[in-house]
Amino acid sequence: TEKSTLLQEHDATVFKVAKSATKPEIKEAIEAIYDREVKGVNTLVQKGKVKRWKGRPYKRSDFKKAVVTLVEGQDPIDFTGAI
């Protein structure tokens, strides 16, 4: 899709992270786990949607997303290699 193309052009990957995670903690974790140099981390809180189940409304939980941008010239993070 259009969003994923823009993310790929800027060597960015989106992660679902703990609500309490800070940008420096996320950067440290990505560098340690994936052995890549992180250029920047942007975070946002995705608000939960209101849904219905058996006619009764309920609210999905809010969650935090981190958009991690890698330093240029590095291989992108590949999630399909572990399968």
Image (tube, rainbow, N blue to C red):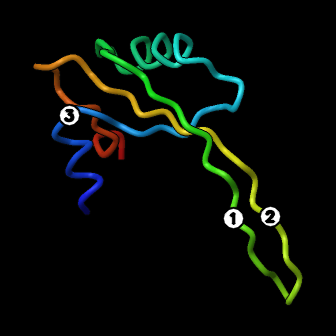
Horizontal side of 76 relative to 58 (left or right) equals: left
Q: Are marks 1 and 2 in contact (CB under 8 Å)?
A: yes
Q: Amino acid at mark 2?
A: Lys
* Residue at mark 3: 10
Query: Which mark, residue 59?
Result: 2
> In this picture, is 38 found above or below 52?
above
> Circle 1 — which element?
loop
Horizontal side of 1 relative to 24 (left or right) equals: left
- What residue is drawn where x is 24% and y is 59%? 2
> In this picture, is 31 found above or below 8?
above
The residues tagged by marks 2 and 3 sit, at their Cα atoms, a distance apart of: 33 Å
Horizontal side of 66 relative to 13 (left or right) equals: right
Q: Earlier in the sequence, mark 3 or mark 1?
A: 3
Spot occupied by residue 14 in the image (x, y as percentages of width and height): 42, 39
* Residue at mark 1: 49
Classify residue 1 by image quadrant.
bottom left
Q: Earlier in the sequence, mark 2 or mark 3?
A: 3
Q: Are marks 3 and 1 in contact (CB under 8 Å)?
A: no
> In this picture, is 78 found above or below 4?
above
**Which of the pair 76/4 is nearer the observer?**
4
Label 1 environment density (alpha carbons within 10 Å; few <14, some 14–19, many ≥20): few
Q: Are marks 2 and 3 in contact (CB under 8 Å)?
A: no
